[in-house]
Image (cartoon, coloured by chain):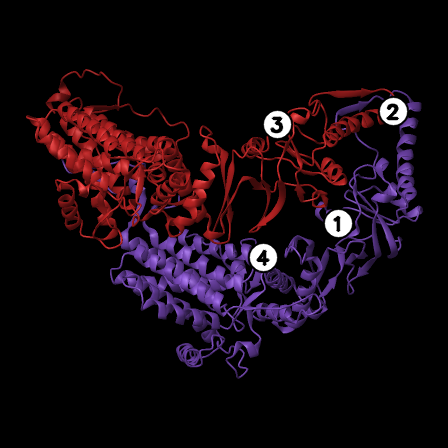
Chain colours: A purple, B red
Amino acid sequence: MALAFDEFGRPFVIIREQEQKSRLKGLDAQKANIMAAKSVARVLRSSLGPKGMDKMLQSPDGDVTVTNDGATILEQMEVENQIGKLMVQLSRSQDYEIGDGTTGVVVLAGALLEHAEALLDKGIHPIRVAEGYEMASKIAVQQLNKIAQKFEFSKDDVESLVQTCMTTLSSKIVGRCKRKLAEIAVKAVLGVADLERRDVNLDLIKIEGKVGGKLEDVELVHGIIVDKEMSHPQMPKVIENAKIAILTCPFEPPKPKTKHKVDIDSVEKFEGLRLQEKQYFTDMVNQCKDSGATLVICQWGFDDEANHLLMHHDLPAIRWVGGVELELIAIATGGRIVPRFQELTPEKLGKAGIVREKVFGTSKDRMVYIENCANSRAVTILIRGGNKMVVEEAKRSLHDALCVARNLIRDNSIVYGGGSAEIACSLAVEAAADTVAGVEQYAMRAFADGLDSVPMALAENSGYQPIESLTAVKAEQMRDNNPYLGIDCNDTGTNDMRKQGVFETLIGKRQQLMLATQVVKMILKIDDVISPSQYD
Amino acid sequence: MATMLQPQIILLKDGTDTSQGKPQLISNINACVAVADVIRSTLGPRGMDKLVHDEKGNTTISNDGATIMNLLDVIHPAAKTLVDIAKSQDAEVGDGTTSVVLLAGEFLREAKPYIEDGVHPQLIIKSFRTAANLAVRRIGGLAISLEGKDEQEKRRMLVRCAETTLSSKLVGGEKEFFAKMVVEAVLSLGADDSVKMIGIKKVQGGSMTDSFLVHGVAFKKTFSYAGFEQQPKKFENPKILLLNIELELKSEKENAEVRLTDPAQYQSIVDAEWNIIYDKLDKCARSGAKIILSRLPIGDLATQYFADRDIFCAGRVVEEDLQRVARATGAAIQTTVNNLDPEVIGTCQVFEERQVGNERYNVFKGCPGVKTATIVLRGGAEQFIEEADRSLHDAIMIVRKAVKHSSVVPGGGAIDMELSRYLRQHARTIAGKAQLFINSYAKALEVIPRQLCDNAGFDATDVLNKLRQKHALASGEGARYGVDINSGGIIDTYANFIWEPAVVKANAIEAATQAACLVLSVDETIRNPRSQEPDGQPQGGMGRGMMGRGMGGMAGMRGRGRGMRRRM
């Protein structure tokens, strides 16, 4: 901290624990911040694109995660540095809002900062740089809107949606069966989508993972999968036209919530109590039976006596089903959650076409499928895979694909991938820069250079000469006035992304540009970092 | 060593730190100037932000003077006054916190040479007070009142004021967008409503421009139980019931115990409990309300009960939000479900649960008593939204001040230059020392335009000279000229809509003068040693430091009025 001196030239303390605080000021602060942000971006750079590599992260508890998803990598890296944390949040915001493009946004922000650093060295005021960036990002967004195309799809013609999801999945470990996963993602989203309001509640899509089998075994269930089994091994495994009683009360004698004590002072009373308890069980089972239920799903457990009685009365049951799942079941089957046996009525029962228990492989793992529900708004995707890491990564990838499909339903504009959109924007910004007088011109050029680093990273990750491929594509875009040319990552022989079928959503790209610019501005605007220098 | 032999008269507790006299005054001034220097660079549209990182690992990135001062954790007693004026400016007008600290620092800096030369501080104080009074009166004369203009005009003026405030903040790039939003929010309030009626909600994700204003109330979906998703999520013209009771199956009395002698009675107790809760729920449902909100939990049983009857419910609603809903919808918060008259039930045009970013939000729109508004802020990073929140808070305060006292002064340092010129002119009419002091005061006022230039990287001397020339024009036409932040020249800031409410400036000058006078009037500091730290650790550094100083005092010059503080 700034030290003040008295008239004898001795410093004195103004701020608590002054000498233990470190302070970075001015250009040094900016340099240090940019350095931190850049190093975070550098970690992700190699994950970009279809040929991007994965990262293995080990948590303090020894859990291993293998992933390609930018947001997940940064989250698990546990970045300590404050500026680094900003980058983590940047990627998280992209994840929350769009769900995809989390790597790209960080790489872009890193590149923008890198180029800003050079401008700062020239002595340009950081805020002027930030303002130039803002101007440039506006132009870039305009250009995106210009080159975007509407994508027509309908409930029957989903090919275009599938293509876009495939672009997202192609960079993931599950790229091998991207077609299948993309189709599943699109079907699932369409299954729960409200096409008129253009609203998709992703909560209605449940993703379940089970280790075992192979990735290709992934399936979409129009209904719910519960990771539970029938409460008694001898209960029937398949129930057709099931009527389901959804209970939140245990198969137990009811207990008052108020503290209570029962005084038993004679044998008769004890007998009475025992009989009464027994009676409760019989009543409960009968109440279920009377309402016409053929399956009982209960939030709580029930003891062996009840279990036995249920079995005896041919009433299959599932116990310990979590609240969220219970709710999903209720929505899917059109039933009501019943808090008390007395309130069970036939109208409150949920209906499902078929309920079956499925055994996986040789293991004893069982799951209950509830399918063909009365109201099939809820769907479940069951992912299989060789090990836990693959299943988890497949879940994350599928989540990205679901988000992409959802975004397309919200707004069906797309831009082309493979860095083509970035190159087009870069060209537009560069052209616009020449018309701006003042320091901002430099900043805009730097922004254009920053945009170029995304296709450059793509080319680099795909094993090409980054500069050569970028300049070649850029020249071609200029010559043919064709903004759909990008880096040919998969070596298919064409640079035209329309032919390759590489799409990204417009809102995703736009968000990337805007978010990256905002965070860069925030970082550039800091000229003073005051922090405790040591952690005790 | 000779002193050691004489018996010491112990007047104060051992370890007490006393310092007095002129040197003490100088060192106090130095401390204040040092603090003012810290936030110097945040002033103006080209001001930078500070990243402050505290021991607990919280990080704040801010441009707001009061926030930074607060986080600096100043312990120097004199310098603390600066923190206090920043806080009071924040509480009083909400903006101009950086300027006020800067001004106070500058006043002290100007006073320092006189103190060193042996001028009595009281003389300086007196002159400064006079100067401040003159300046404030002059602001009144210079202010351009917008009273009597039509609504449209007034609104435009408010937007301009908000824009000026926002231009120095992180959200400056979108100032038009936010200024309009802030003005709309403030205007939807009544004249005397507290700012609390404007809710600011923060949702991470999205870009700044995705932020939106709700004419009504919006709050995050509360914790919900199973069954919640089965409730309808959209109503038109619903009746709204607000409660402050728990709707849960629970024991009615905490410490009660029921004793049963006959097992047969068991069921009746169970039933009784169920009846109590069902009775409550029935009454709620019978009131005709379609939306039921409670500050206390609404349990799973109630959730499912309401779901069954197509009623929406939300428990654990935050108190503030609930009160805003009450204000907006005209409902009264009930603590019982008995006697639910129609009067206590509110309504609104549309209620909807909406997806915002990653969260779901309950939104009440088209409320009859629109005395509340909610701004939902979006942004890339947590700190980003936090800072946007602070910036908007400043803007809201400014707009509210401007609504009440609708007169503005030109910003961009123009008003400060003009005051400075005016005081200089005035000083020439005074005979005596006061002339010097008022001249210094006038010079100190120039710190605002000077700092604006410095922060933007312009040649401050050059710009200031241009400004002085303009303001000195006899015709008075140059009075509205201030720093042009874009070109590095000067500009008529009034014509370019860089406006500040007059009251902000007046308050800043008064507060800064008072703080400066306060510091000047102190000539002795007595600091008692801290009583033994019971928990030692967090204050450990302090404790040790004090000890060291206490020992230093023992070693020789005790009681001599050292007039300085030893290094810890």
Q: Nearer the viewer, mark 1 or mark 2?
A: 1
Please name the residue that numbered disc 1 is placed on.
A331
The C terminus of chain A, quarter of image:
top left
Please name the residue that numbered disc 3 is placed on.
B333
Please name the residue that numbered disc 4 is placed on.
A63
Crowding around mark 1 (Cα neighbors within 10 Å: few <14, some 14 to 19, many 20+) is many
User: Element at badge 2?
Assistant: helix
Q: Quadrant of residue B567?
A: top left
**Numbered circle sitting on residue B263:** 2
Marked residue nearer the N-terminal end (4 or 1):
4
Q: Chain of mark 1?
A: A
Q: Chain of mark 4?
A: A
Tell me where residue B472 appears, x and y as whole percent. Answer: 13, 41
Q: Nearer the viewer, mark 2 or mark 4?
A: 2
The amino acid on which the numbered mark 3 sits, given as a three-letter code, is Ile
- Asked whether the residues under the numbered discs 1 and 2 touch, taking CB atoms below 8 Å apart as contact, a structural biologist would say no
Q: Nearer the viewer, residue A437 or A8?
A: A437
Q: Nearer the viewer, residue B445 or A4?
A: B445
Q: Nearer the viewer, residue B546 or A470?
A: A470
